[in-house]
Amino acid sequence: MTWPKNQDETPAHLLDSDRAAGFEITSDYTRFSQMNDMFTRAFWDDSVRSPHSDGFFASYRMEAAPRKGEGFQTRDFALRNAAWRVSDMVSDRHASEGEREGFQAPLRSDTPVATDRAVLDTPEEEAAGIKRIARMFGADLVGITHIDLRWHYSDRPDTRDMTPVANDLPEGLTHVIVMAHAMDFDLVETYPSALAGAATGLEYSHEAAIVLHLSAYIRNLGFQAVASMNDTALVIPYAVKAGLGEYGRNQMVLTPEFGPRVRFSKIFTDMPLAVDAPRKLGLADYCHGCTQCADSCPPKALPVGPPDFGAEKAAGSPSTQRGVRKWSANCEACFGYWAKLKSDCAICMRVCPFNRRGTWQDRLWRCLALGGAGQAGIRLARRWQSHQGVRPRRKPRDWWGNPR
């Protein structure tokens, strides 16, 4: 599939969607190479690769790095790695061909596209049906938007030798089904820990099954469907365009239902579906006056200032996307901290004011924070949050003593 090389070639409906989403994109914007994401650079870039980063990746297999620290003991690593198992099985299926499915290549389908297409109802009815089926398979949130190749990686790595190869999709794809998968609240409360990493692995394993289920359903209807997780395209702009949330200071999509405590998957299809509109929810507006994630970040990788076009950070880091006005992190500092931990860190997810369990007090605070009672309500929510402070990390031993 070809992509528009500049704004003049970008279809009008995508530019309209940019405006609705609040996206500001420079005229010289170019697509991001997946060779430059931190997880890929850790294999080929000597400025990133280190004994710590090698140990980080090895710890997810049979070379765990247990230690005395609470949350980093043998049982914690064992649970984390077990939670990743289904995702690992899927991603390793074609490793011998240089494809790490779901992360550095789309998931291959063993379901052929049916020769006879199903007779469809209206795009609106079909979209509602797809969302219902997606939720039946286990997705927590579902939105639909137009395909937009500006967000697709310009290339991807061949994982056999970490060299760039084409990042192609079949011709004729028109829509993207975006699904959000909520992570376990109680596990997330134990970040940073290897134990908390089980929440990440569990949702990647869940979403691997869900995208394969839903893509097989669509292909059985006679339409193309390419299942995708972290691969192929940047999911954040797609999730925002599909109306699932807004971009936050912590570099995550904030959803009104779960805050940032979600993972995303997607399916590229040519099935004619009605699309959702981006929504102004008040989440990003709240972020402008909140630095709780940045203040809590141990390597100080998150920005405290307003969004920008990333030029300053990108000048020293190929992992920072430039040309889109947004908050940008110090990717090297963030990943360096992960590597030393030998596990993922999501303190910024845990401490986000929108990451809440869902009690009536939480629902009331969210309503106020999102403008349900006007500006006075937002000010009250900020005072309430300031008085409440950052929720303390849950001790991993307490989780093991009472996991539910």
Image (cartoon, rainbow, N blue to C red):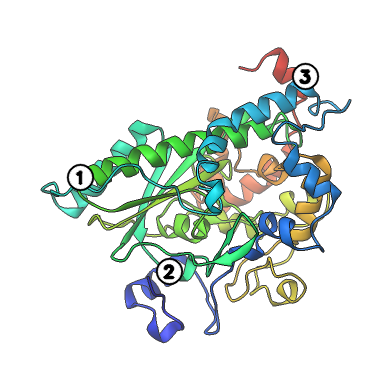
Which label was assigned to residue 370?
Answer: none
- Which quarter of the figure has residue 160? bottom right
**Closest to the observer, 403 or 156:** 156
User: At which x and y percent is residue 40?
Assistant: 66, 57
Assess disc 3: are there few (<14), some (14-19) or many (≥20) residues with their C-alpha within 10 Å of its C-alpha.
Answer: few
Residue 171 in the figure: left or right of residue 386: left
Residues at badges 2 and 3 in contact (C-beta under 8 Å)? no
Alpha carbon distance from label 3 to label 1 = 48 Å
Q: Quadrant of the C terminus?
A: top right
Instruction: Give the labeled residue for mark 2.
Output: 149
The secondary element bearing badge 1 is classed as loop
Q: Residue at x 74, y 40 (%)?
A: 58
Q: Is residue 242 visible?
A: yes
**Closest to the observer, 117 or 275:** 117
- Which quarter of the figure has residue 186? top right
Q: Mark 1, mark 2: which one is toward the viewer? A: 1
Residues at badges 3 and 1 in contact (C-beta under 8 Å)? no
Alpha carbon distance from label 1 to label 2 = 25 Å
Q: Is residue 186 visible?
A: no
User: At which x and y percent is residue 130?
Assistant: 28, 43
- Examine the rendered structure and indicate whether residue 228 appears above or below residue 186: below
- Which quarter of the figure has residue 274? bottom left
Q: Mark 2, mark 3: which one is toward the viewer? A: 2
Instruction: Give the labeled residue for mark 3.
Output: 397
The secondary element bearing badge 2 is classed as helix
Q: Check disc 1 and give the amino acid type.
A: Leu
Q: Residue at x 44, y 50 (%)?
A: 244
Q: Check disc 3 and give the amino acid type.
A: Arg
Instruction: Give the labeled residue for mark 1.
Output: 221
Q: Mark 2 or mark 3, which has the lower sequence index?
A: 2
Q: Mark 1 or mark 2, which has the lower sequence index?
A: 2
Q: Residue furthest top?
A: 401
